[in-house]
């Protein structure tokens, strides 16, 4: 079938299998070009099919020759209807890993559930014995609590007062003002339940209880802080409360792993185009300005560049892992440079529908958004028939 991008609001309803394959191959090529990393050899990636999780699996496998198990919740294709991009990413990753002689197996299901945890533990026990590195990179907006059965929904809202600022519709390029009403009722508690650290801790507790963590095992969860421009709706809003909980959980996990000399970290990564960030008001405008500046400075990074640098320059240097005064790894350091943020603050005041094409990188934003779904990659013939029925070879 001929597969074209089909949009509904901030969502692309289609994905291209060959484009997703090209995306994975491009990331593998980048990691291999940067040389070998003396990293972990047995890696579990929870949330492994897109974004930072996919980049982590690729970097582990093709940077350190690691055996990887990936957990994700993706939609497989049916005749005449493409699967989700994460499905095609995972299929491409496994094909490339197996061609390289690397162990790679996957589990497709709800990572919050006890059933998927049980399935994962059994697979590790049977195939790998113990795990050296656990990456926690879930980005689900909802969670069914495995103990209570309650469905929690996260919200992105300010706390206490209405937030008003500029935003851009990246499809049309129209810059406008938007207001977001403050959270109410159980919004904070529900957001913390979904995006805080409870599930991360449950995974580590389950692995530890069955002696599946190697001595010195490390676990890393991904987070974001961002600039003062967005803090009212992000870091000081409901999501920020969840991130605070995630960071506190890292210390609790480290305490629980003392007997095996294990450690837990939160890595604060840079702002990037994701399905989630595209739906957050203000963020697309901020990212379009950020991209323009960072590209001009020669310091722009996508997911794979961020994670490769995280592994090579932070996690696996043979030295103590550098952190900030709150114990966080800061791989957003280039984004948060004073000179970069000062330029953004200046451009933010100037940003209008008319000026944005010149002062921002909205085209780069749009391309990155389409790339998420396998579109607009060089070397892919999008006019040709694409086989939508692609399988992930080693789903357990």
Image: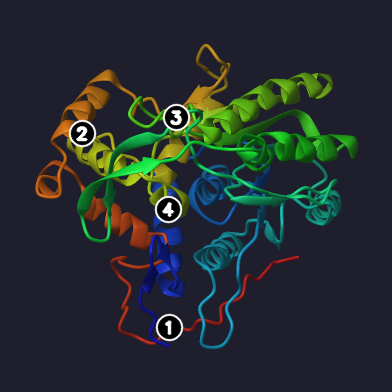
- Local secondary structure at mark 1: loop
Q: Earlier in the sequence, mark 4 or mark 1?
A: 4
Q: Nearer the viewer, mark 3 or mark 4?
A: 3
Spatial CA span between label 4 and label 2 = 32 Å
* Residue 137 seen from this side: yes
Q: Quadrant of residue 321?
A: top right
Furthest residue in direction top, as rendered? 325
Disc sitting over residue 386 in the figure:
1
Quarter that holds the N terminus? bottom left
| Residue in front for this viewpoint, 286 or 361 | 286
What residue sits 58% from the left and 38% below the top? 184
Q: Is residue 34 left or right of residue 343?
A: right
Residue 356, how many percent across, how many down? 15, 46
Spatial CA span between label 3 and label 4 = 42 Å
What residue sits 52% from the left and 17% below the top? 322
Q: Residues within 10 Å of mark 3 (few under 14, many from 20)?
A: some
| Residue in front for this viewpoint, 34 or 191 | 191
What residue sits 82% from the left and 39% below the top? 207
Spatial CA span between label 3 and label 2 = 22 Å
Spatial CA span between label 1 and label 2 = 41 Å
Quarter that holds the C terminus? bottom right
Spatial CA span between label 4 and label 1 = 21 Å
Q: Where does label 2 land, which residue?
A: 348
């Amino acid at each position: 079938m001929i597969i074209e991008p089909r949009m509904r609001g901030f969502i692309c309803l289609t994905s291209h299998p060959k484009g997703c394959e090209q995306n994975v191959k491009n990331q593998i090529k980048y990691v291999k070009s940067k040389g070998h990393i003396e990293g972990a050899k047995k890696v579990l990636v929870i949330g492994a099919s897109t974004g930072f999780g996919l980049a982590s699996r690729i970097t582990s496998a093709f940077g350190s020759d690691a055996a990887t198990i990936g957990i994700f919740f993706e939609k497989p294709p049916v005749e005449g209807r493409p699967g989700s991009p994460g499905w095609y990413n995972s299929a491409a990753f496994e094909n490339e890993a197996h061609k390289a002689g690397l162990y790679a197996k996957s589990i497709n299901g709800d990572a919050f559930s006890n059933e998927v945890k049980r399935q994962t533990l059994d697979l590790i026990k049977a195939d790998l014995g113990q795990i050296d590195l656990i990456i926690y990179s879930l980005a689900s907006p909802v969670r069914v609590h495995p103990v209570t059965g309650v469905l929690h929904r996260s919200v992105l809202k300010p706390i206490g007062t209405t937030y008003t600022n500029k935003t851009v519709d990246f499809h049309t390029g129209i810059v406008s003002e938007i207001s977001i009403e403050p959270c109410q009722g159980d919004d904070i508690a529900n957001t913390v339940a979904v995006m805080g650290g409870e599930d991360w801790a449950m995974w580590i507790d389950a692995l530890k209880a069955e002696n599946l963590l190697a001595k010195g095992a490390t676990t890393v969860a991904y987070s974001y802080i961002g600039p003062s421009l967005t803090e009212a709706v992000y870091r000081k809003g409901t999501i920020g409360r969840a991130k605070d909980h995630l960071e506190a959980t890292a210390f609790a996990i480290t305490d629980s792993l003392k007997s095996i000399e294990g450690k837990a970290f939160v890595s604060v990564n840079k702002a990037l185009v994701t399905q989630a960030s595209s739906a957050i008001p203000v963020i697309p405008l901020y990212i379009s300005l950020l991209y323009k500046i960072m590209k001009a400075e020669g310091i722009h990074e996508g997911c794979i560049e961020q994670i490769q640098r995280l592994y090579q320059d932070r996690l696996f240097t043979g030295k103590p892992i550098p952190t900030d005064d709150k114990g966080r790894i800061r791989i957003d350091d280039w984004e948060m440079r004073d000179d970069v943020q000062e330029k953004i603050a200046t451009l933010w005041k100037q940003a209008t529908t008319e000026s944005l094409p010149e002062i921002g990188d909205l085209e780069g934003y749009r391309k990155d958004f389409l790339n998420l779904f396998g579109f607009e990659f060089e070397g892919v013939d999008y006019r040709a028939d694409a086989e939508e029925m692609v399988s992930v070879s080693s789903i357990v």
